[in-house]
Amino acid sequence: MRDEQELSEAEIGKISGILDLQEQLMVKDVEQVIKNRVAAAMSQLEDADLTLSDIDPANEEYFTAVLLSELFSRLHSGDEDVAETILYNLRAQAGLIL
């Protein structure tokens, strides 16, 4: 194991490339997991004759929100300063900070 200061520009670039690829693959995996959970929930709702005509209780937005909430809790672990930083960054990402 080496210190970061010992890495060359090429090695830093390689690290970045590896992480970028893995991030992309992870996002695709998560998207598929959400789709799978929606399909499973819909199937169970249909089997139980619990489908609704006006709303779809099992949808990608719902499961994405559940995941976001869980990840947010995991990231801040009760630390208010970390939670504020995450929320600030999310507001900026949404274009809510001038």
Image: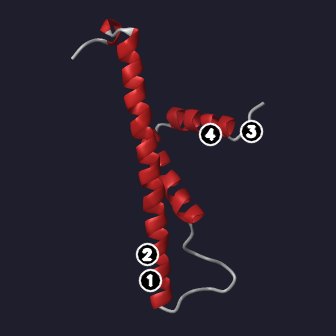
Residue labelled with disc 4: 90
| Disc 2 residue type (three-letter) | Ala
Amino acid type, mark 3: Leu
Amino acid under disc 4: Leu
Q: Is residue 47 left or right of residue 59?
A: left
What element does badge 2 sit on? helix
Which residue is located at x 44 percent, y 68 percent? 37
Q: Quadrant of the N terminus?
A: top left
State which quarter of the image contains the C terminus.
top right
Query: Nearer the N terminus, badge 1 or badge 4?
Result: 1
Residue 72 placement (x, y as % from top left): 49, 46
Whichever of callouts 3 and 4 sits on the residue coming sooner in the sequence is 4
Q: How far apart are marks 3 and 4 (CA)?
A: 9 Å
Q: Between 54 and 9, which is closer to the camera in this rendering?
A: 9
Identified by mark 1, the residue type is Gln
Instruction: State the image coordinates of residue 34 (x, y, percent, origin top left).
Output: 47, 62
In the picture, the disc for residue 96 is 3
Residue 77 visible in the picture = no
Q: Do the residues labelled 1 and 3 touch (CB within 8 Å)?
A: no
In terms of secondary structure, where does tag 4 sit?
A: helix
Please tell me which residue is depicted at 46% across the width and 40% down the height of the picture.
76
Discs 3, 4 touching: Cβ within 8 Å: no
In front: 79, or 3?
3
Q: Name the residue under label 1.
A: 44
Looking at the rendered image, the disc whose residue lies closer to the viewer, 1 or 3, is: 1
Residue 52 in the image: above or below residue 61 = below
Q: Do the residues labelled 1 and 2 touch (CB within 8 Å)?
A: yes
